[in-house]
Amino acid sequence: MTTIVAVKKRNKICLAADSLALFGTRKELSGRDVADGNKIIQIGPNAIAMAGHVSWGLILKDYFFKENVVTEWESSDQIHEIFHTFHLSLKRQYFFSPTYSSYEPFESSDLELLITNSYGIFEVDYLRTVREYKYFSAIGTGEEYALGAIQAVYQSIDDVKNIATIGLEAASEFDRKTAPPFESYSIDLKRST
């Protein structure tokens, strides 16, 4: 699967991801086995990293470039509306077969994303719930390890890329579905934290 982290400190933000992809029992590493297997994609001024099936990257790029939805997403409400519309298109254009559980109140989009831009860190979960994070977040199979490591070093290290890398290193050490090499994307924030 994957581990993805985002860290915000002072006026910087970093989105980082591991490179492991699993296809049944086969594993592939971006850069070593797969060309252009990056988990971080650029949609206008927004960097998006996804946990889940590798097809999500292709679908997200296709949809957002065709629909020309490339503005910088400033708020949780705006991102929720964008992904609500995206979910409708998934069913119509991409033959998406959504899952439904009697335990969940809404139809699932079956994807989880971290989005960073100059406004901050946003998570979109499988029910299209959007949360904005003040300092850091992680998603994926190694998220607990990454969050623990980031929490442990957040106050003592200023460089957001270093903090993010420490989170991914902890996840790759203990989560069998997370592996280096790591990729990252860093930007400056419009509002300081």
Image (cartoon, rainbow, N blue to C red):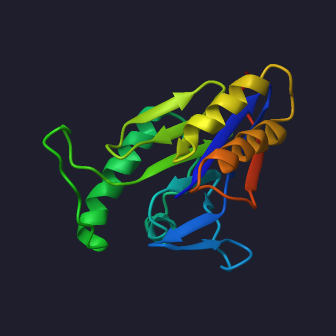
x%, y% of residue 18? 67, 56
Q: In this image, 24 relative to 120: left or right?
A: left
Q: In the rendered image, is residue 190 in sight?
A: no
Q: Residue at x 40, y 54 (%)?
A: 111
Vertical position of residue 76 compared to residue 72: above or below: above
> Is the residue 133 above or below the residue 20 in the image?
above
Residue located 84% across and 40% down the image: 162
Q: Quadrant of the C terminus?
A: top right
Q: Residue at x 68, y 71 (%)?
A: 30
Quarter of the view holding residue 56: bottom left
87 relative position to 175: left or right:
left
Residue reaching furthest to the left: 102
Q: Nearer the viewer, residue 134 or 85?
A: 134
Foreground residue, 131 or 164? Answer: 164
Q: Position of residue 116 (x, y in %)?
A: 63, 43
Residues 46 and 14: in front is 14
Q: Which residue is pictured at 70% across the width and 48% down the height?
A: 173
Residue nearest the viewer, comparing 79 with 178: 178
Q: Is residue 90 left or right of residue 189?
A: left
Q: Quadrant of residue 79?
A: top left
Number of marks? 0
Give percent across and percent down for residue 78: 44, 39
Q: Is residue 45 visible?
A: yes
**Whole-percent x, y for residue 48 in the image:** 58, 53
In the shown orientation, is residue 37 left or right of residue 181?
left
